[in-house]
Amino acid sequence: MTVTRLTPPSVTGPRPSTAPEFVLKELRRLIVVGELVPDQPLRQDTLAERLGVSRVPVREALNTLAAEGRVVHEPHRGYRVARLSLGDLLEVYRLRQLLETEAVRTTMANPPAGVLSDFRDAARAVEIASDGGDLLTMTEANRRFHFVLVAAAGLPRLERIVGALWDSTEAYRLLYYETPSNRERVESEHSQMVEAFAAGDTDRLIQLLDDHRRHATNALRALLT
């Protein structure tokens, strides 16, 4: 299997409707795939030239990324890619556990129509990307899979907070997927989650999600220490 890790900037492909949207999407991608690495300075003029835009949308995108926790702004020094410590990572996953458990319990109490089908489709998308070795697509599909349950809870503030937590650790998720056995584990665990949802077994689903996060943090702990 050939693993797709780095891809060229998508400046020649279809762009979002506005320059700020394009720049934001592209900078997120560059951080996730590791072309922009932790602690790397982000010069607005250099990024603007690379992406073929003015500095204005670059500055707007960097401000958004700072709010997401993906970059850090230091007065008189500018922006740099954020570095997440092991302690930061564990804190994020602990917060996710608390919030996602609440979302799952809310969703399972009264599942909206079509959620099971969406959940299955999202799991299949992760599997296809994993089997094809397309790690960036797998990362995006994995997010959609988990947010099926979060969004179905109908708690928009909770969903926004969970989204911010995911944003801050996205690059590390790609690192986790580089190991084939980790990708296989993800596929298996997702399948079990879908089965638990279909059976209406809330406690089983929550336990599977807890195990899923623990396996990821254990693997990342080994990589980051």
Image (tube, grey):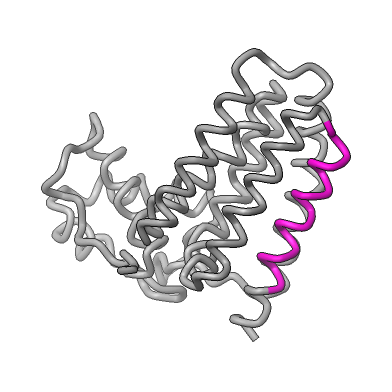
Question: What residue lies at 63% left-to-right and 28% top-to-bottom?
Answer: 151
In this orientation, which residue lies closer to the viewer: 168 or 56?
Answer: 168
Name, please, the residue furthest toward the bottom: 225
The quadrant of the rendering that contains the N terminus is: bottom left
Q: Position of residue 8 (x, y in %)?
A: 20, 61
In this orientation, which residue lies closer to the viewer: 176 or 171?
Answer: 176
Question: What residue lies at 44% left-to-right and 52% top-to-bottom?
Answer: 138
Q: Position of residue 43 (x, y in %)?
A: 28, 66
In this orientation, which residue lies closer to the viewer: 176 or 167?
Answer: 176
Residue 74 visible within the image: no
Taking the magenta stretch, the answer to whether it contains residue 221 is no
Range drawn in magenta = 201-218
The quadrant of the rendering that contains the C terminus is: bottom right
Q: Position of residue 164 (x, y in %)?
A: 59, 46
Residue 98 visible within the image: yes
Q: Could you tell whether 57 is left or right of 125 in the image?
A: left
On the image, which quarter does residue 17 sit in?
Answer: top left
The answer to whether 169 is drawn above or below residue 56 in the figure is below
Q: Position of residue 171 (x, y in %)?
A: 48, 63
Question: What residue lies at 76% left-to-right and 33% top-to-bottom?
Answer: 103
